[in-house]
Amino acid sequence: MRGLTQFFQRVRTYSDMAMSSIRPIVISGPSGSGKSTLLQRLFKDYQGCFEFSVSHTTRQPRPGEEDGKDYYFTDREKFEKMMAEGGFLEHAQFSGNRYGTSKMAVEKVQKSGKICILDVEINGVKNIKQTDFNARYIFVQPPSIEALEARLRGRGTETEESLKKRLDSVQEAMDYAKVPGAYDHIIVNDNLDIAYEKFKGILSAEIHGVMCDQYKKGM
Ligand code: ADP
Ligand code: 5GP
């Protein structure tokens, strides 16, 4: 009898896993809208549940950023070689640099069994939608463009030139977010705690689902 109960429990666990079908999460939003801040909190609170797909970029590392953790920092020549070899799921030019999600990065997360999270700009979103990557799309919206500029300045990572380039792309990203169906969820990041609660709510199936429970128990 106990064996039968265990058998059905196991069947239920596998069907729950199939139902949760761990769709990857694509997070997007203007530079400075708070994507990294929300993700850092999530990864800290739910270790072992989510994993970041580490992108390649040709931009220079910021102080504190680690190669292989925040990005794979590379040069234009190597990036373009990878492009030619079909190594990217998607890639785009942003603010004078190249960014791309390698197939290898996504496969690495998928093999881990964790929920894959990607942080990409608007063209990345559009390009991923052309693939069979069955993702959920979340847009992180700043409360206003003025607040966004103040946050970007406050972050202290940009020169006047790179700040301007980043701000130039904001309106396009905001307009695309208004297109019906562009995103599954929009989070307005005004108060960080409220935005984070909304983010967790969107991911509640994953957070409370069997996949996270298993990792929480260290299985
Ligand atoms: P992104 O990853 O989207 O480029 P960041 O997460 O780096 O943006 O956030 C940009 C800056 O804004 C950072 O200095 C961060 O600490 C700050 N920030 C993020 N969310 C908020 C918020 N809700 N209120 C005030 N400052 C914020
Ligand atoms: P940052 O230089 O601030 O880290 O990132 C700049 C922009 O590039 C952000 O909007 C971020 O979402 C986007 N980005 C980061 N990685 C990728 C990627 O692999 N592909 C695409 N298309 N955009 C990315």
Image: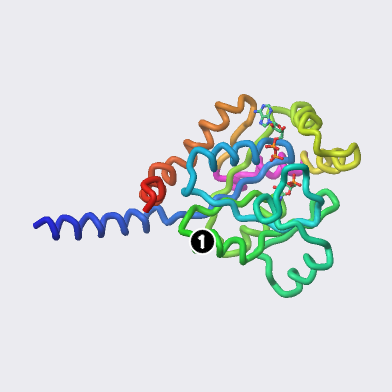
Q: Residue at x 55, y 32 (%)?
A: 196
| Residue extending furthest toward the bottom | 85
> Compared to 193, does 79 lie above or below?
below
- Which residue is located at x 76 percent, y 43 percent? 172
User: Where's residue 175, x and y in %?
Assistant: 72, 41
In this figure, what is the number of numbered marks?
Answer: 1
- Residue 142 x/y as whole percent: 69, 32
The magenta segment is: 171-184
Looking at the picture, how far across and down is residue 131, in whole percent?
A: 60, 64
Q: Assess mark 1: CB under 8 A from ligand 2?
A: no
- Using the image, determine if residue 87 lies above or below residue 63: below
The quarter of the displayed image where residue 208 is located: top left
- Please, which residue is most extreme toward the right here? 161
Verify whether residue 180 appears in magenta.
yes
Q: Residue at x 54, y 43 (%)?
A: 43
> Which residue of the protein is positioned furthest toward the left in this rendering?
1
Between 208 and 62, the one nearer to me in the picture: 62
- Disc 1 designates what residue? 110
Please indicate whether residue 189 sits to the left or right of residue 14 in the image: right
> Residue 101: within the magenta?
no
Residue beneath the point at 51% across and 61% down: 110
Q: Quadrant of residue 8?
A: bottom left
Type of colouring: rainbow
Quadrant where the N terminus sits is bottom left
Q: Amino acid at mark 1?
A: Gln
Q: Position of residue 15 (x, y in %)?
A: 31, 58
> In this view of the protein, which residue sits in the foreground, 126 or 211?
211
Label 1 sits on a secondary structure element that is helix
Query: Is the residue marked by circle 1 packed among few (<14), some (14-19), or many (20+) residues within 10 Å?
Result: some
